[in-house]
Amino acid sequence: MTVSPASTSPNKVQPISAVKGMNDILPPDSARWEWFESHVRDVMAGSAYRNIRTPIVEPTALFVRGTGETTDIVEKEMYSFEDRLNGEQLTLRPENTPGVVRAAIEHNLTYDGGKRLYYMGPMFRHERPQRGRYRQFYQLGAEALGFAGPEVDAELMLLAHQLLSRLGVKNVRVEMNSLGVPSERQAHRAALIAYFEKHKDALDTDAQRRLQTNPLRILDTKNPAMQAMVQAAPQLLDYLGEASLQHLDTVKRLLDACGVAWSINPRLVRGLDYYSHTVFEFITSELGAQGTLCGGGRYDGLFEILGGKPTPAVGWGMGIERVLELLKEQAVISSQPNLDAYAIVPDLSSAPLVAGVLQTLRAQGVSVQMHATNDGTAGSMKSQFKKADASGARYALVFGADELAAGQVTVKSLRDGQGAQSLQALKSIDSWVNMLRQ
């Protein structure tokens, strides 16, 4: 009889894996994330956008109101639960715009004028994990609160374009549309319902369910059998008044002035009534079905829905995993953090002295790694040099007995192909520290 490993070790502790669709980000891949985040901070600072950090857990009602009761997110995808201590209904945030608006209302952020904000962090949706779509995913977002003019719509689009360009992303197209104002959407909505009712037999189950509650969402369908019928549906652009058309025209002219190519997609919509005027997406054809890198628009009605004063607002969200995946597909190499120096310590008895020297170097901006042991022994010089080379450091600092006796350290180049080296005085670190940082 074959005995299974489990039966021979009944008390063996089984390892625990991460939740499906919620991934670890490990070195060296995490360096790509840090590289991305550093560019984000620079671009946001350059346009006067300031960081906001909201809780991961919010009241469920925030997303029911702010994301929409009839959306797939609320109906099927939210991680919601009851707080065992007080019975409160809570949800892991599936997106962050409602949280930002909730914070703005709660803390009266716009009392003294508009605010430009950005955030980065994890969001949560229970959907089938696939390339570029995970149950815990990371999103970058930018929100401009308290600004009604079309120039801020364009500003947000230019901000996303600048970031993607700076990262080196290629082959991304910009699509936009106008949703007008509520009265214009109501007229379009009535025309849509009348049109779809004439073609009711061609609607799938989801479309029939949305026909009376959210007909705009039918225009988003990915069902191939419905595409021709949807393409012939009434277009919202035909129902826009002069002011809405002027708003859209101003956005177009600002993008043109900055050399950003765009196209109008009359099927680009948002299924929630608080959206108005400009909506837009940055799209790639290189990630299959997950091709939308960034999507946004103007949501002037959201503040009132969440209990605040009428406040104009516009913003966008960008999927970080999708952008990094596209950069990998396009072979864009992110700059890796370079280690300046690796400390080689032949005799462990000198480790306290070496540690003090390395702390002095770090305080002056030098990144340095000290050799660490696995078994309590220093290891051979050869093995330490192998580890120094593998670390990616540009220099090795050799703290040998002879050097230390003379109050010196050998600084050896690991990357110039010649292995040039020199002796440097430990008491005169200021005189050679710049060499390590260059």
Image (spheres, rainbow, N blue to C red):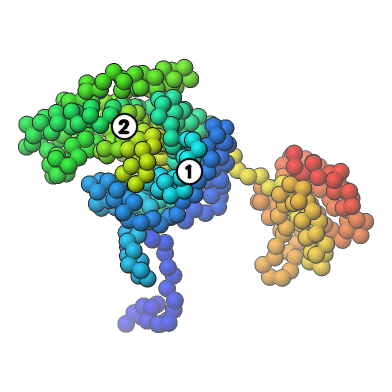
Q: What percent of the width, then of the height, locates residue 10?
A: 40, 82
The numbered mark, 1 or 2, whose residue comes first in the sequence reads 1
Secondary structure under badge 2? Answer: strand
Q: What percent of the width, then of the height, locates residue 158?
A: 46, 27
Q: Kindly identify which residue carries mark 2.
A: 276
- Please identify the quadrant where the N terminus is shown: bottom left
Q: What percent of the width, then of the height, locates residue 288?
A: 33, 37
Viewer-closest of 387 and 29: 29
Q: Is residue 83 left or right of residue 425?
A: left
Asked if residue 371 can be seen in this view, the reply is yes
Residue at the image point whose x is 85% and y is 48% from the top: 429
Tell me the kind of residue under disc 2. Answer: Ser
Tell me the kind of residue under disc 1. Answer: Leu
Q: Kindly identify which residue carries mark 1.
A: 109
117 lies above or below 267: below
Residue at the image point whose x is 14% and y is 28% from the top: 191
Q: Is residue 168 left or right of residue 226?
A: right
Q: Is residue 209 left or right of residue 410?
A: left
